[in-house]
Image (spheres, rainbow, N blue to C red):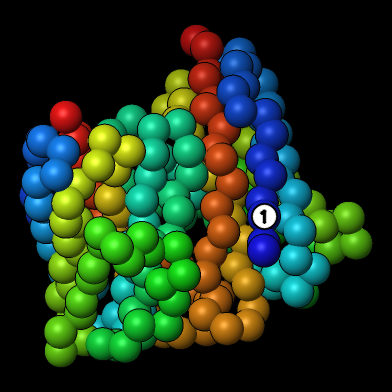
Amino acid sequence: EAGVAQSPRYKIIEKRQSVAFWCNPISGHATLYWYQQILGQGPKLLIQFQNNGVVDDSQLPKDRFSAERLKGVDSTLKIQPAKLEDSAVYLCASSLGTSGQETQYFGPGTRLLVL
Amino acid sequence: GENVEQHPSTLSVQEGDSAVIKCTYSDSASNYFPWYKQELGKRPQLIIDIRSNVGEKKDQRIAVTLNKTAKHFSLHITETQPEDSAVYFCAASLPSGTYKYIFGTGTRLKVLA
């Protein structure tokens, strides 16, 4: 079974620039998550999709972050404009169902450095 | 909101010794508690999980215990090996609404050969 795929793996940008990350979840997984992991901390949920609908974006800084999951499969997360504090690893995860008691499988992450 | 505290932040043990990592959650309605291992530069991977209707679960050298009354759960690793060195994260899943995970802050485990 193929795992969660993410690209790019690394990105360096200057503050105020824009950046986009892409995630392809495990085939058939209904729920997709984007997390932000700042160095030395646990992952923090930014947004959660069930199929192509948003079910939780309470911690997404909506003035600069946006995400979409067209057709309920792939997803993109965008930051515009980036700030220094956005430097982090952005992890995508997916789970088969929607019960909350199912394993979340993580992708390798995109390491973002904002200069 | 839901909060998960994790201790210790770093833990060093001699190879062959046991390691224990503890987490406390705030929402008594939480009902699912996974543990993830994250090696340097790699993705978090599930190593064990426990549901609220179970008090203990074991899988070879790792075990997890849950005390619902005290709202805490612990990861136990016995006969530690150098390859156990990693950062370990606990999480609690809220049972209502969006069923999202709240992660602890992580424990960096070093197994000294």
Q: x%, y% of residue B76?
A: 68, 40
Name the side, left or right, on which A5 lies relative to A54: left
Q: State which quadrant residue A12 falls in.
A: top left
Query: Going 79% across and 52% down the picture, which residue do you hit?
Result: B72
Query: Going 9% across and 38% down the picture, which residue do you hit?
Result: A13
Q: Chain of mark 1?
A: B
Q: Quadrant of the N terminus of chain B?
A: bottom right
At numbered mark 1, what does the secondary structure look like: helix, strand or loop?
loop
Circle 1 sits on which residue? B3
Q: Is any part of residue B6 visible from this angle?
A: yes
Which amino acid type is marked by label 1? Answer: Asn
Query: Going 44% across and 76% down the picture, which residue do you hit?
Result: A56
Q: How many numbered marks, from 0 up?
A: 1
Q: x%, y% of residue B33?
A: 63, 61
Q: State which quadrant residue A91 falls in.
A: bottom left
Q: x%, y% of residue B30?
A: 70, 70
Vertical order, A72 against B112 (above or below): below
Q: State which quadrant residue B53 falls in.
A: bottom right
Q: Is any part of residue A23 visible from this angle?
A: no
Question: Which sits in the foreground, B16 or B25?
Answer: B25
Q: Residues within 10 Å of mark 1 (few under 14, many from 20)?
A: some
Toward the top, the furthest residue is B113
